[in-house]
Image: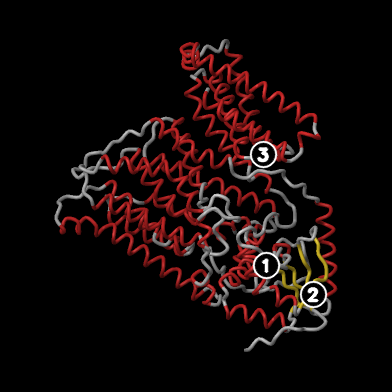
Amino acid sequence: MLLLTGLTAGGFLQYRTQSHEQGWFEISAKIRAAEFLGWVGLTIFLGLAVYVWFFQTDRVLSWLTTPKYGPKWVRWLALPLVVLLLSVYPILMFGETSQYVLIDWTRQAIFVWLVVMVSAALAVWRGKSWAAMLPCAASILAVGYHLATYLPGISNYPFALGWSETTRYYVASTFFDHRIYGIDLPMVFRDFTRYLMQAVPFLVKDSPLWVHRLWQAALRFGSTYFAGYLLAKRYQIKGAKWVALFTMWAGLFFFQGPVFYNLMVNVLLVIWLVKADRFWRTLAAVAGISVWAGLSRINWIPMPGLMAATFYLLEQPITGKDIKAVTRYLWKPAAWVVVGTLVGLGVQQGYAMISGNPEEIYYASFTSYLLWDRLMPNPSYRLGILPHVLLLSAPLLVFVGMALAGWRKRWQWIRPLGLTVIAGGLFAGGLVVSVKIGGGTNLHNMDVFLVILMLIAAEIFFGRAVDHQGSKLEIKMPAWLQAVVFAAPIFFVISFSGGTIPKRDMEAAQQDLNFLQEIIDRETADGGEVLFISQRHLITFGMIENVDLVHSHEKLLLQEMVMSQNAEYLKDFRLELIGQRYSLIIHDPLPQVFKNVDKAPYAAENNVVFSELSPWFACSYREFTRVLQGNLVIFMPADVVTCEVVEE
């Protein structure tokens, strides 16, 4: 009651403050009526909370734990009510009402009240206590909202729904280059495994764009929960309810990064194949999984070996205390890490050599700017990387710290030290990768740390850790900490996303496509080349016809090369611009001014593009027109080239 009172008061007062600041209160009778009812409801609820606290505690607790809900037909009315309530939160967050409720305390108060109502409905339906249904209700609501965040993106709208959304589909299409484009293209320049998974719908010839969007949503949503399910099986959780609860919690936890679906494959395979007490099986598994890691991302290359080592340090005892005993103990996990890392690096290097791409593009990440200010709150990331990752990981860190401290006399120092080195190294490495320019706006580069922390905590919680004699180590998580651990990823996901879904005008989009097709037909009739930097998927899915694909300077690659200031690549592109190789260039609007990095989001990225790319377009091409409500520019060669000559 006190928690509900506090959240209700916080949410209502934040809503009230916003309505007055935005001027809604003065111009809307509905807003004024809502505020009046809010004051009345808050006063009544506060009085009820005080009354229950001082006078009716025993009766309320008795009703919550031993409910009497009447005849069975009443129970079955509760099931459709649950379904109805599950839709309320997404509708509020994505509907016309979103502008009023998206602020933090307001949306969280709404969610908690929905949890209360769904808990009550589930209790009636199942004939269980309200308290027993509380975690089920919170999990189902959070997972339902998580799923709902993907639904607006599943459409056949022809243009991109985000900065790089459809570019991903183009890159995936290059696995079928001969069938789709009739030419031989280089292999994808990075994230090979991601695009390999995204290429699956291309197995069906002429699969429409909405199918690819649906498949990507399924991968994003399903991979984390499948990992949670495999973990539940690994830990032999009993009872369908508890398996479902842990699966939902784990899926929400992995989403906090988020851990991308191609990277989740590493986690899935380790959970499935690695056995800490079987050296050769684990060595073979780590080597095989590291092939996938090497084709994914460089910071994931050591992860198969490190995850296997984490299981080993927790599940296998050490016999003896001298240096020889420590050496005998450590050589197995060390072998897994070394072999896995070498395999991953070898695969990555070999891929770079055979991919058909310029070798220098694979080292762009090492020459990019590092924006250390993004560790702390900044215009591009309100919470900042460091405070946010500490906030999300604090509950599990407290639990793991309690366990390590409580067991200090029952296992040797090398095991907790090893776990600390693994987690600490991944934490530090994740911070460095996160501050690379172009990133630092969420926690996806802290994914390796979040995964290893979750695995350590789960191993301890489910009794997989052993002492120096091989006996199971047990520690009970305090109830308050269980509640915090459980609630943390739920509150993360329900605070994520939102806003009125934009109304996409299909008729206007088709008119833009027709206009673009006319211009392209006119220019290509004389043999001109057309470079799609943005919206290249229009060629992939046949929405733009009669144009030969120019593979060079794909959007993601161009952005990466600009951010890393790859001199060789940029020189070649500038020479093409000066020589006016292309009759048309289709690209996003380019930056026109420098931005203040202390005030404007993504100012650093804007400024690099403004200095490294915008001037070369300005001196060699002109902006012919714009389509897509001004969000897509058609460039044509300028009458006079005013660029300085780029030295060969």
Residue pointed to by mark 1: 594
Q: Whole-percent x and y of residue 180?
A: 68, 66
Residue 260 showing in the rendered view: no
- Badge 1 element: loop
Is 359 on the left-hand or right-hand side of 94?
A: left
Could you tell me which quadrant the C terminus lies in? bottom right
Question: Rounded to the nearest whole Å, what is the CA distance between mark 2 and mark 1?
Answer: 20 Å
User: What SS does tag 3 mark?
Assistant: helix
Residue at the image point whose x is 29% and y is 51% from the top: 312
Asked if 163 appears above or below 458 in the picture, the reply is below
In the rendered structure, are the residues bearing label 3 and label 2 in contact, judged by CB atoms less than 8 Å apart? no
Give the residue at mark 3.
93
Q: Tell me which corner region of the image, top left, top right, bottom left or bottom right, holds residue 149.
A: top right
**Residue 29 percent location from the top left of the image:** 80, 29
Question: Within 10 angstroms of label 1, few (less than 14), some, or many (20 or more) residues?
Answer: some
Identity of the amino acid at label 3?
Met
> Disc 1 to disc 3, how far (Cα)?
34 Å
Q: Are marks 2 and 1 in contact (CB under 8 Å)?
A: no
- Rendered residue at 59%/65% (across/down): 175
- Which residue is pictured at 72% across the width and 43% down the height? 500
- Which of disc 3 and disc 1 is earlier in sequence? 3
Left or right of residue 78, residue 326 in this image:
left
